[in-house]
Amino acid sequence: MLATWREEVAMCSGDRLVADFVAGISARPDLPRELDEHLTTTMDGLWVVWAHKLAWQAGNRFVPLTGGSRYPADARATCRRGGAHDAPDPGCTCGFHALSSRRLPGLPGDHDCTALTVALSGRVLAFKWRGGGVLWRAERQTVVRIDRPAPAARIAAVPAKRHPDDPDGRLAVVPAATPRDSGPVRLNLPVSCPVLPVCDDDAGWCLGSSTSEPSPASLVLV
């Protein structure tokens, strides 16, 4: 596994559970109205959750900012604590963590990390988050875009309302008319994926103050 760096890191945690549902199926999940904007469909017509997180990139894998276990671009989670429950579980921290927006407060813009856009499927839990958005914990996570995080000031300047669209590498507000190449034109979930024990993943927006800046090169295999 990967050794963690020596610094104070706070793991993102949610507040009240507001939804517990299954995504990655053809039936649209029955969610509270305020969560509908985070749903999108794949090429096959499967409903998934569009979400965001930060991580270190190490080769073809990603490392949570809390120094947790590495994960590939597509994986299904199990609880690494050996509990009798499936991941995610409301009473545990298992599952893949992500947030509802890249524009939520707390983005550690001074850290050289990678911004990921992910599609969440399988069982998904939605928690109210102190930053004003939603903290998701999901059974399956598929990385659909890798990008350098924009400075916090630039992110704040983007209008708050933006519907999920295709991972084309551009950040733009979706206008009233459907633009060309938007939506699920290229989004597709792999047929199968590896299963990993995950209990220490993190969305990456809650990095505490530190005196040094870690990098993938400082994460040493042990």
Image (cartoon, rainbow, N blue to C red):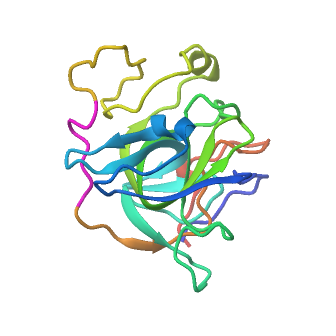
Q: Position of residue 102 (x, y in %)?
A: 55, 32
| Residue 184 part of the magenta segment | yes
Residue 152 occupies which quadrant of the picture?
top right
Up the image or down, 117 lies above or below 29; here it is above
Residue beneath the point at 40% across and 73% down: 195
Magenta: main secondary structure equals loop
Q: Position of residue 66 (x, y in %)?
A: 66, 56
| Region in magenta | 183-190
| Residue 76 part of the magenta segment | no
Residue beneath the point at 64% across and 30% down: 109
Classify residue 134 as left or right of residue 87: right
Q: Position of residue 93 (x, y in %)?
A: 65, 66
Up the image or down, 91 lies above or below 7; here it is below
Image quarter of the C terminus = bottom right
Up the image or down, 107 lies above or below 21; here it is above
**Frontmost residue, 150 versus 175:** 175
Residue 133 occupies which quadrant of the picture?
top right
Q: Position of residue 200 (x, y in %)?
A: 62, 65
Classify residue 106 as left or right of residue 150: right
Image quarter of the N terminus = bottom right
